[in-house]
Amino acid sequence: MAGNSDPLSPRAKLAVTAGKAVAAASRAAGRGSGSVIGGRVALKLDPDLLARLAQNLDVILVSATNGKTTTTRLIAEALRAAGPVVSNALGANMPAGITSALAGSSDARYGVIEVDEKYLAGVARDTAPKCIALLNLSRDQLDRAAETRMLAENWREGLAGSKAVVVANCDDPLVVWAASSSPNVIWVAAGQMWKDDAWSCPSCGGVMQRPGDDWFCGECGFRRPTPSWALSNDHVLDPHGSAWPIHLQLPGRANKANAASSAAVAAVFGVPPQVALERMYQVQAVAGRYDVVQFQGRDLRLLLAKNPAGWLETFSLIDPPPTPVILSVNARGADGTDTSWLWDVDYSRLTGHPICVIGDRRLDLAVRLEVANQHFQVYENLDQAVQACPPGRIEVIANYTAFQDLRRRVGN
């Protein structure tokens, strides 16, 4: 049972103290939150620290290619109806960052943890989660992470026999394949806009059939499971068939899907859908995502999109033409240095928008937009791009480090 107060060992206490001191020094030096470096130092001093910190918590892990930071935040808000929560709210989702987050709270009942896809199996071994939410898998950072089929296989092997309740999106065949090794799965029909990574069967390699919202493999019989929770327009349908309205301040269908999965997770811990969804309304932005900021007398809405599936979802929620759009792409370590994914994005969806292009890899993006027959201009920085935009709110779409650059520039 979570909530016990077993004291940490002297070694663990030393590791926590040292990690916090290093993190504070990093912040004082202006090098970010310090959570990653602090966690690395703590784990160096006590390699078992993550497991020790998690042992008195009901741990919920959230993993996906897209939406895990937002879903982690929504679950955390919902579970606060049942008790104190500790979470890696800023998205430091590898073991060092997770360790720092858990070290920051001694009185929490729940630990709601976003986990990088590559590290899910290992973090699950260390933290013995009560619940694992699996949202989607698509191509992302192919120079760092494994190909999606390999990630699904790693999840499947790592979660085999897990005692956790797995809440999984039944509309993503790769997620279903990964979750099917678990004995206790709750299926959620959360939808899947991006399908280009799931046309072949993850079980046998056969061609997937996709009539309507259904899917199945005609060769081996692998098919979409029947969901017990579902997103239906602006409502969440629970296992009893009751429809609960979704009222979010976060935009877009993708966030409604995140809310549906979050409601299913909250219900595992006894929080009713109505209570969970009402609490989710309080979330206005997530680590700067969806924030509307003032810059040079203009309203800018900041949107994060870091891979083809994310860009597709983001294009679906921006204001229609002639709303100006600024696109910013970097290819630093945290982004993945391979920009070939730009060619998988359907930029025809931006037709009619005035487009400004910035970022370290602005010329790569410019070539892609040229081939897509889009009208655009390339600028050196955000200041120039904003000055060139026609009137109206500006939609600013950026990948990971480009997004952080923008937040610093606008003081967000």
Image (spheres, helix red, strand yellow):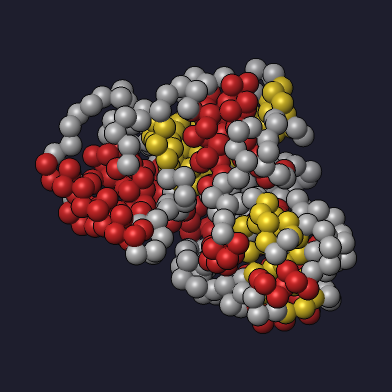
Q: Please state which of residues 240 and 393 is positioned toward the viewer in this rendering.
A: 393
Q: Is residue 226 visible?
A: no
Residue positioned 55% across, 41% down in the render: 71
As displayed, is residue 311 above or below residue 8? Answer: below
The x and y percentages for residue 260 are: 63, 33
Outermost residue on the front side: it is 297
Q: Is residue 72 left or right of residue 99?
A: right
Picture layout, residue 405 above or below residue 42: below
Q: Residue 34: x percent and y percent? A: 35, 57
Q: Is residue 380 left or right of residue 140?
A: right
List x then y, in percent, for residue 287. Answer: 54, 50
Q: Nearer the viewer, residue 53 or 220?
A: 53
- The part of the image, by quadrant, that contains residue 12 is top left
Q: Residue at x 28, y 30 (%)?
A: 56
Pick the front one: 301 or 370: 301
> For residue 299, which quarter of the picture?
bottom right
Q: Residue at x 62, y 26 (%)?
A: 278
Q: From the image, which quarter does the N terminus lie in?
A: top left
